[in-house]
Amino acid sequence: MRLTLQTHDGALILMSYRGVRTSSAEVAAKIARGERVNRDEYYLRTAPFFETGDKRYDWLNTIVSVGIGERLPNGAAYDVFEVL
C-alpha cells in the first residue's frame, strides 16, 4: 500500500507499508459490517516506511517503524513507533 501524508505544516510524506490483520471469523464479520471492535480482539500490525524531500522531516527517511492498527467504522487508526 502507498499513500501520501500531508503534515499540519504542509510537508508531503510518502508512506508505503505492508501489514497483517488476523482475527476470528466472528470479529472479521463485525469489522466487515462496520461495527467497532476493540483492538485487543484482533491482531493488526504494519511495517511503514517513509520518504520525503522536506528537510524538516528528513529523519523519517532513515528509520524503521512498526504500527499497531485499529479498524474504525469510517477507516483505520495507527500508532506508529520507531524501532530503535
Image: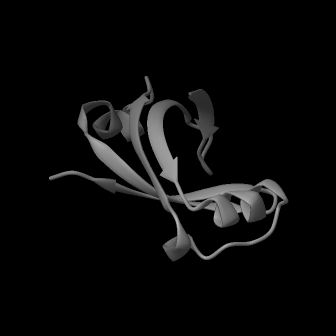
Which residue appears at 54% of the width and 73% of the height?
41
Q: In x, y percent, where is residue 40?
A: 50, 75
Left or right position of 60 against 45:
left
Q: Is residue 38 above or below residue 5?
A: below
Residue sitting farthest toward the right? 33
Residue closest to the far left: 84
**Which residue is nearer to you in this view: 66 or 12?**
66
Horizontal and vertical percent for residue 45? 43, 52
Front one among 3 and 41: 41
Q: Is residue 64 above or below residue 25?
A: above
Q: Quadrant of the N terminus?
A: top right
Q: Is residue 72 above or below residue 54?
A: below
Question: Residue at the location (34% across, 49% down)?
Answer: 66
Residue at 66% from the left image edge and 55% from the top image edge: 76
Q: Is residue 21 left or right of residue 4?
A: left
Image location (x, y in percent) of residue 51? 42, 26
Residue at 41% across, 53% down: 67
